[in-house]
Amino acid sequence: MTTAADDRVAEEAFEACLAGRPVPGGAAHLAAFTGAVRDVATQPGRPNAALAELLTTGLLLDQSSPSARTAPMAGKPHRASRVRIRRRFTVIFPVLIAKFLSAGAVAQAATGAGIAVVVVAGAGTAGVLPDPVQDTFTSLVSNEEVVETPDDGLTDVIAEEPVDEDVVAEEPAGEEADLGTFDPATWELGPQEGESFGSWVSQAAGDEAFKAALKAEGLNFGTLVQEQARAKGLDAEELEAELETVGITLDELAGEEAAEDGAEIEQAEDAESQDATTQRETRGKGKGKGAVATDGSGSSNGSASGRGNGRG
Amino acid sequence: MRTGVAFDDVLAAAQAGAAWAFEVLYRDLSPVVTGYLRLHGAAEPDDLASETFLGVFTGLSGFSGDEDALRSWVFTIAHRRLIDDWRRRSRRPQVTDHAGDLTLLAGGDVEQDALVRVGAEAVQRLCGELPADQRSVLLLRIMAGLTVEQVADVMGRSVGSVKALQRRGLRALRERIENSPERSAPRRVPLSASMAITGVR
């Protein structure tokens, strides 16, 4: 008949067995049993096919997880996937620019449109844009099958990459070609598909020869821009926003038109001639700023971002 | 950890999906997990152990704790897989004759293998004769090295309940060993290999 005392002794002996301590003689059976049990567990089991594969290749974790970036991407070349994403982004970035600018959602950045667009793109990826813009961004990104999550580092890479002329030179892009090969004939047709209004304006803004040619034909640069803006359905506020992305003010554009009018009556009055000179000087400064901004913005809007993706 | 690699490093790598870390954890825990399932009478302990580790590795990213906590968690998964297996089979676990398999585990010495095989068969029979809950408590404490509190977590029982199950299990074990054929017959076949080596009769 087992008593409570017997139970207590057995429990103490059992704890001693587990701890590897010597056990009393009366509990030798427990030591034997414990040893025999542990002897059964000496070799690993045979893994099934699924486990064997997991032990060989590891586990591909969720991309949203931070740890996923450190996990081995079994069977998927890391470089190839990044190249694929970079090129997709290069292609759709001008489209993104067009969409964002047309929606009036451009951030008023102090250092050029490239970073502004990056900020908007990043916000779009994070889902914090105003609803109409966010919907546009989401549908656009989903259609283009670009990066799905904000944690993949792609947007961060874009934001961190400064506009770099050397980087621009490495990867040809449509936007870069526009800067170097301005075609007056196509320019007069207005912004091309996927081209922002501001970019279109900036192409000709610094080309005095082109403006002179327009003048010779009885046309005015500022007037053409205004007409194209009306054709695109841009009101004054939107046009101003577009122009500011490339460093041109509405006043400067208006000055282009005013210069034409001023030139017509310049012969009649000296005061107007003085004003026209002043306006030409102002336009010169504006052109300088526009040219600089154009180069910077053009690079960052188009090529730089794509290159940022690539280098990231 | 037996390999000497710091547990934290292995765990972090495994949570990141590294194959080498999975291998380390598997080699460290698979013997005891498979043995636990085998002594519980699982018909296919290797397959059940594989399912256990698949669950462990795929869910590892959500785990946090030290080595003891990991061991406890692994056996929790193994215990639940076992219960699911019982329910699928709709029968109490039966003592299966794994003498052939256990012989492979023993080594190359023929005489030693015979002694170990008998010991293993006796252990399996004794375990099979215990009620499932009592068997679970004893095996989790012996094979997994879990405390009473950890066993309670694994089994979903209270600490008091686990202590009671342990007490009854030890009592039943003593009674069965005292009445076992190995003890009643002439002592030519000892209960365990260690007893044979020491010459205990």
Image: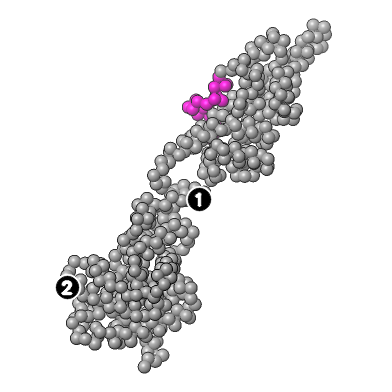
Residue at image coords 77%, 16%: A258
What residue is disc 1 on?
A: A65
Q: Check the image and name the residue furthest to the front.
A: B90
Residue at image coords 68%, 42%: A130
> Label 1: chain?
A
**Where B5 sits versus A153, above or below?**
below
Residue at image coords 39%, 61%: B51
> Label 2: chain?
B
**In the image, B37: left or right of A166?**
left
Viewer-proximal residue among A53 and A90: A53
In the rendering, at what x and y percent does residue A255 appear? Answer: 74, 19
Viewer-proximal residue among B143 and A234: A234
Chosen colour scheme: one colour
Q: Quadrant of the C terminus of chain B?
A: bottom left
SS at circle 2: helix
Check residue A307 for magenta coloring. no
**In the image, B150: left or right of A92?**
left
The reply to whether residue A109 is in sight is: no
Viewer-proximal residue among A231 and A36: A231
**Where B25 sits versus A303, above or below?**
below
Look at the magenta stretch and give its main secondary structure: helix
What residue is disc 2 on?
A: B111
Magenta range: A161-180
